[in-house]
Image (cartoon, rainbow, N blue to C red):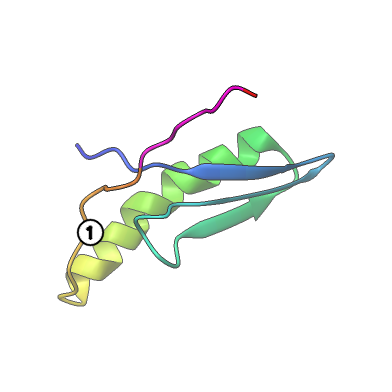
Amino acid sequence: MTDYLVVVEGSDGSFSAFSPDLPGCAAAADSREEVERLMREAIPLHVESLREHSEPVPEPQSSVLYVPV
């Protein structure tokens, strides 16, 4: 199993998410929980589609860093 980084943005009933290592794999929803669920569903489907079309499946490269201010 491969783990892909997912960036979640938004607040107040409007959330979006994307995976930097999987261009075009994104979701939007009214809650953080829903957008996370949608991304859990979208990533395997996105990877499956890449494979079906004989496209390369990118290896995860992104990471996260928090900088205290």
16 left or right of 6?
Answer: right
The image quadrant where one finds the C terminus is: top right
In the picture, residue 49 is in which quadrant? bottom left
Q: Which residue is label 1 attached to?
A: 58
The image quadrant where one finds the N terminus is: top left
Above or below: residue 21 compared with residue 64: below
Q: Which amino acid, by three-letter code, is at mark 1?
A: Pro
Q: Main secondary structure of the magenta part?
A: loop
Question: Magenta span covers which residues?
Answer: 63-68
Instruction: Check residue 65 for magenta coloring.
Output: yes
How many discs appear? 1
Instruction: Check residue 46 for magenta coloring.
Output: no
Q: Residue at x 65, y 45 (%)?
A: 9
Judging from the image, what secondary structure is the residue with disc 1 in?
loop
30 left or right of 26?
Answer: right
Of the pair 4 and 68, the residue shown nearer to us: 68
Q: 10 Å neighbourhood of mark 1: few (<14), some, or many (≥20)?
A: few
Q: Residue furthest front?
A: 69
In the picture, residue 35 is in which quadrant? top right
Percent x, y for residue 8? 59, 42
Of the pair 56 and 48, the residue shown nearer to us: 56
34 left or right of 64?
Answer: right
Percent x, y for residue 47? 28, 59
Percent x, y for residue 5? 39, 41
Q: Residue at x 23, y 59 (%)?
A: 58
Q: Residue at x 18, y 67 (%)?
A: 51
Q: Residue furthest bottom?
A: 53
31 left or right of 38?
Answer: right
Q: Residue at x 27, y 48 (%)?
A: 61
Percent x, y for residue 60? 26, 47
